[in-house]
Amino acid sequence: MSTGVPTIDTQHKELIAATNEIGDAIEKENWANAIKKLLVFLKFYAEWHFGNEETCAAKHHCPMAGVNQEAHKKFIDTFGKLHDRYCQSDASDEIAHKIYDELCEWLVSHILRIDTQIGACIKDSLAKQA
Ligand SMILES: [Fe+2]
């Protein structure tokens, strides 16, 4: 799942680690508080990371920049709605599982389908500048 761009890969690892922690928290008793904290962190970190990635893609004129930006917007919307449902449901087990499944699915497919292409474009652009 490497994009070949170290800063992006490091940020992806952080997103995957937070998702794994949510998976671990779901397995435990009394996980509601831990999961709430992780969701808040993930929301903040994902938005921050998306901003970085989008700035980088735009700077290097990547053809996938628009597609990437749209996918990020969609994710923020879907994740935000699930997060709200989770909070309103008083930490529903079912919604926690749904969030975790969505996160796993989305991260893997997004990184493989789009971010690897963004990474290749950035690497090419940097190589041309060198
Ligand atoms: Fe992305």
Image: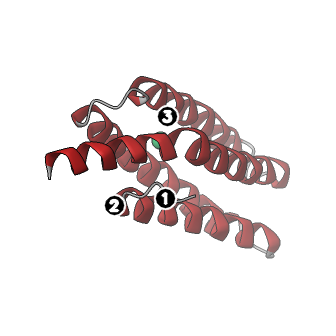
The first of marks 2 and 3 along the sequence is 2
Disc 3 residue crowd, few under 14, some 14–19, many 20+, Cα 10 Å = many
| Callout in the foreground (2, 3) | 2
Q: Nearer the viewer, residue 95 or 33?
A: 95
Residue type beneath disc 3: His
Cα separation between marks 1 and 3: 13 Å
Q: Earlier in the sequence, mark 1 or mark 3?
A: 1
* Residue at mark 2: 7
Three-letter residue code for mark 2 = Thr
Q: How is the image coloured?
A: secondary structure
Q: Where is 81 relative to 66, above or below?
A: below
**The residue under label 1 is which amino acid type?**
His
- Name the residue nearer the viewer: 110 or 94: 110
Find residue 90 and name its label.
none
Q: Is residue 123 above or below residue 71?
A: below
How far apart are the two marked residues, 1 and 2, measured between alpha carbons? 9 Å
- Name the residue at 64% across, 70% down: 21
**Badge 3 residue CB within 8 Å of ligand 1:** yes
Instruction: Identify the element where label 2 is drawn.
Output: helix
Real-space CA distance between mark 2 and mark 3, rounded to the nearest whole angstrom: 18 Å
Q: Secondary structure at mark 3?
A: helix
* Nearer to me, 50 or 68: 68
Residue 72, numbered circle:
3
Q: What residue is pinned by disc 1?
A: 12
